[in-house]
């Protein structure tokens, strides 16, 4: 008689997890070896003992409850995402507002308001004369003032 | 190619269609996947984690994980093995949290095992048959519990859930040789533990 089949191979045999050649060799051996045959019978019995006799009952409407749970999570996640994004954008937005406010309140040259002030404060017929009286260098604003003055004012 | 392999191949193609539909925005496709696999997931959780009052929560956790990650699921892999791997991991996390191994009661049977036995008894057609089955079930539960985690995992996946060796290898990350070895060693230990019941059948 051949040497006994390794028990690990017998375990795979009862699972039908051996190739055709191995199966043939094992079955030939089993027909001659009572000890290995007994081992196979016991392995089959262990498998039988473990085999479930019934399905675990799935609770009614499980899929419907799961779908509802997922929907609630999606909605909660959407809100959470919005808050998360808002929290992260908030400092940048605050800085942007601060910059806009500083820029708008800085003493920039507002041509129209300077021109209005000019016309309101003088009835001079000559802007050049006014400039001469101011005794200062021409600025960018002055140039703009001249550009919007009536030609008659310059005469 | 065996009949089992053909069946698995057909099932995998169905899964693939549903997954593609879900990725395209069809939520109903996910519900179909749930309905298709919910029975197997409940069985696996019951056999592996026990504690039936937690099972629905665990099953929800499993499918929520699937839903969350399905968009990035690689369709080259089999959905069923991926799903079972998630279920096994959820079960293990659950067991660790519960510290089931420290919950031994006076008669040596854990709460997990008692619930399983009670559940099975409740399904029996008569109290007499239930009583006859009770001793055997308790022995089987004790036997499974005294096994190392990996042996128990191998036996549950193969003998209780009926998975093929390659599926078990994918789920656990073991080689085929390791699957074969752990199944054999698990059965060997369980055979010793259940000796009276095993020899009775001869």
Image (spheres, coloured by chain):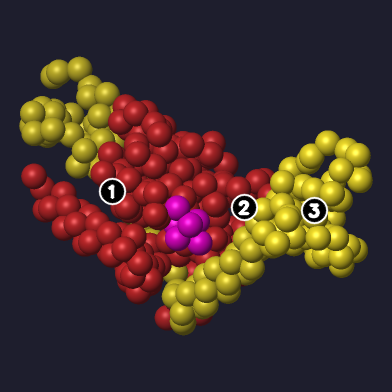
In the structure shown, which secondary structural element does the residue marked by tag 3 occupy?
Answer: helix
Seen from this angle, which residue lies furthest front? A155
**In the image: residue B128, left or right of residue A18:** right
Give whichever of B22, A140 is nearer the camera: A140
Q: Give the residues in magenta.
A: B64-69
> Which comes sooner in the sequence, label 1 or label 2?
1
Query: Does the magenta segment cover residue A114?
Result: no
Q: Is residue A99 left or right of residue B144?
A: right
Q: Nearer the viewer, residue A77 or B102?
A: A77
Chain identifier, colour red: B
Side of A20 where A62 appears, left or right:
right
Image depth: mark 3 or mark 2 in front:
3
The residue beneath circle 2 is B94
Return the x and y of residue B86 as percentages of the image width and height: 46, 50
Task: Find disc 3 in the rendering and name its residue.
Answer: A127
Left or right: residue A16 compared with residue B45: left
For label 2, the SS is: helix
Of all chains, the one bearing label 3 is A
Q: To which chain does the residue with label 1 belong?
A: B
Crowd rating for badge 2 (residues with CA inside 10 Å; few <14, some 14–19, many 20+): some
* Mark 3 on the same chain as mark 2: no
Q: Which chain is yellow?
A: A
Q: CA distance from mark 1 to mark 2?
A: 28 Å
Task: Say which chain tag 2 marks.
Answer: B
Image position of B100 with respect to A55: above or below: above
Task: Residue at 87%, 65% (x, y): give it.
Answer: A123
């Amino acid at each position: 008689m051949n040497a006994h089949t390794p028990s690990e191979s017998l375990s795979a045999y009862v699972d039908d997890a051996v190739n055709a050649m191995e199966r043939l060799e094992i079955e030939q051996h089993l027909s001659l070896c009572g000890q290995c045959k007994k081992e196979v019978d016991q392995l089959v019995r262990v498998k039988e003992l473990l085999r479930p006799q019934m399905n675990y009952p799935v609770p009614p409407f499980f899929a419907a409850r799961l779908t509802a749970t997922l929907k609630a999570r999606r909605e909660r996640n959407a809100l959470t995402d919005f808050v998360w994004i808002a929290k992260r954008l908030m400092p940048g937005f605050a800085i942007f507002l601060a910059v806009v406010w500083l820029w708008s309140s800085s003493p920039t040259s507002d041509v129209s308001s300077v021109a209005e002030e000019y016309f309101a404060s003088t009835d001079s017929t000559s802007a050049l004369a006014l400039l001469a009286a101011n005794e200062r260098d021409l600025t960018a604003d002055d140039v703009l003032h001249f550009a919007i003055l009536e030609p008659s004012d310059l005469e | 190619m065996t009949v089992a392999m053909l069946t698995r191949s057909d099932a995998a193609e169905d899964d693939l269609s549903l997954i593609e539909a879900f990725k395209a925005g069809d939520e109903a496709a996910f519900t179909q996947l749930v309905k298709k696999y919910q029975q197997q997931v409940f069985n696996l959780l019951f056999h592996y984690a026990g504690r039936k009052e937690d099972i629905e929560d665990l099953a929800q956790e499993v499918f929520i994980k699937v839903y969350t990650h399905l968009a990035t699921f690689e369709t080259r892999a089999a959905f069923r093995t991926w799903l079972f791997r998630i279920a096994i991991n959820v079960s293990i996390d659950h067991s660790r949290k519960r510290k089931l191994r420290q919950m031994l009661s006076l008669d040596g049977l854990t709460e997990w095992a008692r619930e399983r036995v009670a559940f099975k008894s409740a399904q029996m057609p008569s109290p007499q048959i239930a009583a006859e089955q009770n001793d055997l079930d308790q022995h089987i539960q004790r036997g499974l519990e005294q096994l190392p985690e990996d042996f128990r995992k191998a036996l549950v996946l193969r003998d209780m859930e009926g998975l093929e060796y390659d599926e078990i290898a994918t789920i656990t990350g073991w080689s085929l040789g390791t699957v074969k070895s752990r199944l054999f060693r698990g059965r060997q230990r369980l055979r010793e533990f259940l000796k009276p019941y095993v020899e009775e059948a001869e």
